[in-house]
Amino acid sequence: MQSDKKTANQVHVTSEVGTLRKVMIHSPDSGLGKVVPSKAQDWLFEDIVHLDTMRRGEYDYFVKLLLYFLDRDKVKGKLKEIDALANQRNFYKPEHPDYFNSNKVIDPQYLLAHILENESVKTRLVASVCAVERCSYTIHEQLLTLPPTELTKTLISGTMPDKSMIFAPIPNFIFTRDIGIVINDHILLNKPAKIARTREALLTQYIFYNHPVFKDLRDKIIEIPESEHHFLLPDGEKDSKSVTLEGGDVMIVSPDHLVIGCSERTSPYAVNQVIKILFDKNIVNKVSVVWIPKKRDYMHIDTIFTQVKKDVWVLLGSLSRYGEEMEKQDLMESLMDTKVKDRLKIIQFIKGKEDKPIHFEYLEDLLSAISENDLKSGKPTRFVYSGNNEFPFGAREQWTDSCNLLALKEGVVVGYDRNDKTAEAFKQTGFTVIGAAELLGKFENGETSPEELENTLILLPSAELSRARGGSHCMSMPLLRESI
């Protein structure tokens, strides 16, 4: 195990499944409780959520799991005490003296309050936010009078201490995967596709450039530039050269190999820019680009596949080899040319051979190559399909994030309890499936420990979390993983 000092300071990720040592998450804030039906889709939600249930009944289990795996002293032997005060939730509030305050499970809200103690940073950030949100001069001046903790809450929730709402909340801030991705020892910051996430990206930029925990990384932060003279292009041509990228479309699968999605949220031009930068800086030497249908069903590549072990992946069958085979069995398919096909396109670029890209026909082919060639798994690659590939459960459970899993260590992943058929598929693949509450109880009574756990799917309560259209992979930004 790595030392506490090294764990506290290092930022380094070389895989999707190495043992997680440091992660950034954001607990649901009051802004989530302000999503109204008329604005839900504008704010990228499919439905309104019940905030208290989402927090106490669901997300808090996620926090306790992460702490048990990454910073055990914060929770071991204390769960009954924490749960007894669940109504107050002070343990989970970055602004409260009773906050768990881990240097391994980090909330950007806590970091933001810290940097706002610097008057220069505070002045610049408030001016930037007010410009983006078109605030009045009066609001601008009022924000500058707020202490760092209150200002932080206002910048995230959009609500002043007197409960007046001065701009929209940023409810997607719980999806920290999208704000940035660690690629080896570099950090790639996002360029959100939706206006609703602009302030989110701005706050993140200030955190990474100004917080002491990232002080040694300033020359390793990657921001994707707009196309040259983008502002001079006619409106009709801007879309083809738009630069948008979100972290759910980026996976570092081995030290030399990045997988990046081209989706409704990540543009081809941004992908092109990322490849150029990564190759020029010698950060990786291989990038696989996965084009997915630009549909709300999918959003990012991590909604259709994530990694479980070196040799195990979970994925959506309808966009895989399996889905292709099912279409071939449909005789009507050959008689109709009007049906729109939702097919993947996969191309791999290798540094120095960019003019000779490698094409993969199926998603399984790419994932098998990663497992067997990049990660040297030494075993045939296995696939767990959403909904166990049973109609209509594959699509239903993918919608509620059956393919969006976070690996706490190789073979131990976190998913949602509502995806029953996918859990069944995991059992058939030899995995243990257990609820988060039950597992935490076993940790507390000494029946097992995170070190002993292997081949396990941990299920979070998810009635409200799933309404936000993001799973545990979306809700986490790994900052440090052990190499595998």
Image (cartoon, rainbow, N blue to C red):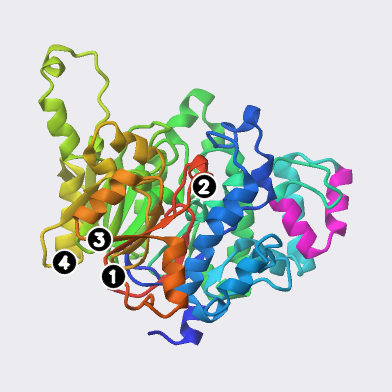
| Label 1 vs 2, first from the N-terminus | 1
Q: Secondary structure at mark 4?
A: loop
Question: Mark 2 = which residue?
Answer: 465
* Residue 15 visible in the current orientation: yes
Image quarter hosting the N terminus: bottom left
Q: Earlier in the sequence, mark 1 or mark 4?
A: 4
Residue, x 60% and y 54% (percent of image)? 55
Residue type at mark 3? Answer: Phe
Q: Residue at x 63, y 73 (%)?
A: 81
Q: Secondary structure at mark 3?
A: loop
Q: Nearer the viewer, residue 214 or 114?
A: 114
Q: Position of residue 395 (x, y in %)?
A: 32, 34
- Which residue is disc 3 drawn over? 431
Q: Measured from the top left, where is residue 317 in percent x and y?
A: 23, 39
Q: Kindly check if marks 1 and 2 are in contact, taking CB atoms under 8 A apart as contact.
A: no
Q: Secondary structure at mark 2?
A: helix
322 shown above or below 255: above
Where does residue 250 sit, x and y in percent of width and height? 38, 52
Look at label 4 and name its amino acid: Ser
Tell me the number on the disc at residue 454.
1
Q: Which residues are magenta?
A: 137-156
Q: Nearer the viewer, mark 2 or mark 4?
A: 2
Looking at the image, residue 164 sits to the left or right of residue 412; the answer is right
Disc sitting over residue 241 in the figure = none
Tell me the kind of residue under disc 1: Glu
Spatial CA distance of label 4 from label 3 is 18 Å
Residue on which the image places disc 4:
377
Up-down: is 340 above or below 311?
A: above
For badge 2, the amino acid type reads Leu
